[in-house]
Amino acid sequence: MMLKGGDYGVLAGGVAAVAALAWWSWFAPTTAADTALIRAAGKVVHSVPLTRAQTLVVPGPLGVTRIEIAPGRARVQADPSPRQLCVRQGWLARAGEAALCLPNQVSLELRGRTTPYDTLGY
Amino acid sequence: MTPSAIELPVTAEDRRIARLAALALGLTLAEAAIPSPLPGIKPGLANIVILIVLLQYGWRAAAWVSGLRVLAGGLLLGTLFAPGFWLSAAGACASLGVLAVARYLPGRHFGPVSLSVLAAFAHIGGQLALAAAWLLPGIAIFKLLPVFAAAALVFGTVNGIVVTRLLANPALAAPASDRRQSGPCPTH
């Protein structure tokens, strides 16, 4: 017999470790957002860093959408859309997260840095 | 008048370790000739020898063989004290450290494959830890982490199976150690 019971356990642990590493290094959305991209009718109307608190007012066909920016996060504070889906999403903090207020054609999308360095020199 | 010769007493164990280290060294050199898509991904054939030494002669002998292999490998490959040498040494040390604990796993349930896989993970872990801390202090290396880990798993398993097969061979399993001994060294 080549393999004993514990060997299968070690191999299963090894496979799990490889899978966990693959998920962690390739798929996990770990990047913190640093910029909020706000679109109205498909066009970017604001691109603001998530550094200081402020409120942006974005007009749309139904009325105004209020977007609240805070250090490190952003949310749709108020919106005239009937179902309030984008408001109920609450605070967004990770790169790639987005809140779409489709009836008012306003969207809030968070972007993160793609690389941690501007440049590297050795 | 003859100059006095310094004679170092050589025990049978010294010879055995030297012979096994030479075997591990041969595998290291053969492996260095195999092209690899990524530096650092190698079958680690020398670990087969290290594991057999560990299982037959104990951890201390395995540490000697491993250390000699790294040192002499550095000499022969021309990488002595170059980054590649330190990476190799870090991997060997981490691997031996894990084996020092893992050899106490109950043999009824854990065979050489367990030891080999654990040692392989420790080996690549030690190398990458040193590389990340010293050579590439960025995060670029972490994108390749799963590739290295998968290679460790595959090669560790294969090497472990080879060790199991070799130890099942009765000629090897009974260490009639110094049968093939030869050479000018005086025996006493």
Image (tube, helix red, strand yellow):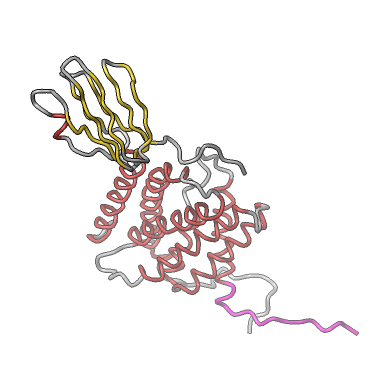
Residue B47 visible, this orientation: yes
Q: Percent position (x, y) of residue A23?
A: 30, 42
Query: Vertically, is B93 above or below A70?
Result: below
Number of numbered markers: 0
* B72 with respect to B88 (left or right): right
Kindly indicate the quadrant of the structure image that contains residue A1.
bottom left
Describe residue A44's horizontal placement relative to residue B18 as left or right.
left
Rendering coords of residue B42 (x, y %): 49, 47
At 21% across and 32% down in the image, what residue appears? A76
Magenta segment: does it hold B172? no
Quadrant location of the C terminus of chain A?
A: top right
Q: Position of residue B143 (x, y in %)?
A: 42, 42
Answer whether residue B4 is magenta in the image. yes
Query: Can see residue A28?
Result: no
Residue placed at 67% from the left, 58% from the top?
A: B75
Residue sitting farthest toward the right: B1
| Magenta part of the chain | B1-15
- Above or below residue B135? Residue A55 is above
Look at the picture and state if B163 lies above or below A25: below
Q: Which corner quadrant of the image does residue B113 belong to?
A: bottom left
Q: Residue at x 31, y 51 (%)?
A: A17
- Counting from the top left corner in percent of width and height, residue B11 is at 59, 80
Secondary structure mainly formed by the magenta segment: loop
Depth order, front residue of B64/A27: A27
Residue B70 or B176: which is nearer the viewer?
B70
